[in-house]
Image: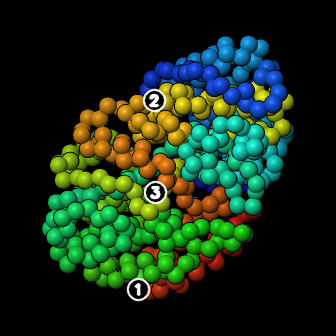
Amino acid sequence: MKHRTSAVVAVTAAASLMLAGCTGGGAPAPSTGGDGEISGEITFQTWSLKNEKFTPYFESLIDAFETAHPGTTVNWIDQPGDGYEDKVLQQAESGELPDVINLPPEYAYSLASAGQLADLGSDSKVIDEYVPGGVQAYEFDGIDGSFAFPWYLGTELNYWNTALLAEGGVTEPPATFEDTLDAAQKLADAGVPTFSSVPTPKMLQIVGAVKDIYKDGEFVFNTPEAAEIIDRYAELYKAGAVTPEALQGAGTANANINSFNTGGVAWTTAGPNYIDKDIAVNAPNLLTDVAVTSGFGNPPLFVQGISVAAHSANAATALAFAEFATNTANQIAFVKLAAGFFPGTVEANSDPAAFSETPVNELQGTANELAGAQMADARMTGAPQYTEAMETYAAQQIALAVTGEISGQEALDKAVEYAQQNVVE
């Protein structure tokens, strides 16, 4: 097993902070969780989700499962946000991995590669009920199997400043990323910048210029299509479509959002709750000028999942509880407490109004609907082997290409070389 640094803790921490109610339970899953008797004791581990706001939900969930399956006991433990990966690896190495465990894809990869997680694609009868992109996030290159049920998900939409678009003669928000590049040139001619961040390999994967970040033991994001987009950015930078701050903040989060909120750029991407939770609070004067559209190409997916230990002493019970905790009723109950997140089953996402907060602004309702609709196409970007340090280095090289110091292809080749030299298998 390997150790890696990841930003996935931010997703869990955000969910924990947003959990503000006390519901739970739901009808028991009809599946028995495969062969074997559902009985005995199991341990269920979550990540930074045990507090006065969230504890009642899990207590209710566990009570409902134990009532539906007499003779079962579910012991719930929770680990703090910091050091979670270290704790999980220690548990696995000492033979004490919990029977059912909350894992992001990066950590699941480490355990799956060491044979520590059950293949839910083979063991579960309900795997097809989950969001395809969420399932695929736990299917790893070189390892056969599906290693988690998608539990709570996030994605991003496109947001536009229509007043700035109009200044450049753009009457409708661009429908594709190629259209956005064309619009950026028109806007630049009118003195309006569009971008305050540079492309990164993950962003290039979203827009379809990169198919895979890592494949068959090699980093492969240095494609001609990706290089072409970077070179196009270099042209747009000279024209004024890319702000100078984009280069200073290469690889940092929220650069475009901050500029968008202050009216500095015409476009940004953000989560589905951006209207009510950010714009309405931090930039209310923008509300009447903001439009929202679906994400480009392959919309990004952020996911937390629930896995089952491969060597559980009560495997049938562990699988049945994992199915139960992530069935549609319980997924909806869970994300009702976490504004901006979406459930992991296809059925639950069919009606975002069933779990989303009541919109304060009409546009927020539109954003909720668009996000729910794109869950069917959303896919996780990057790869378990691709670290934050690699993404930051790539962004720095790409920033050099945007200023014309090197070509887009040179920037990507250097980033691939760096990633290959620093990969931890």
Mark carried by residue 299: 3
For residue 69, above or below residue 324: above
The spot of residue 305 in percent (x, y) is 61, 41
- Check disc 2 and give the amino acid type: Leu
CB under 8 Å between callouts 1 and 2? no
The spot of residue 282 in percent (x, y) is 26, 45
Query: Disc 1 designates what residue?
Result: 404
Mark 1 vs 2, N-terminal side: 2
Helix or strand or loop: what does disc 2 sit on? Answer: loop
Q: Can the viewer see residue 318?
A: no
Query: Disc 2 designates what residue?
Result: 337
- Residue at 58 percent across and 81 percent down: it is 413
Image quadrant holding the C terminus, namely: bottom right
- Residue at 65 percent across and 41 percent down: it is 127
For residue 64, above or below residue 210: above
Image depth: mark 1 or mark 2 in front: 2
The CA span between labels 2 and 3 is 24 Å
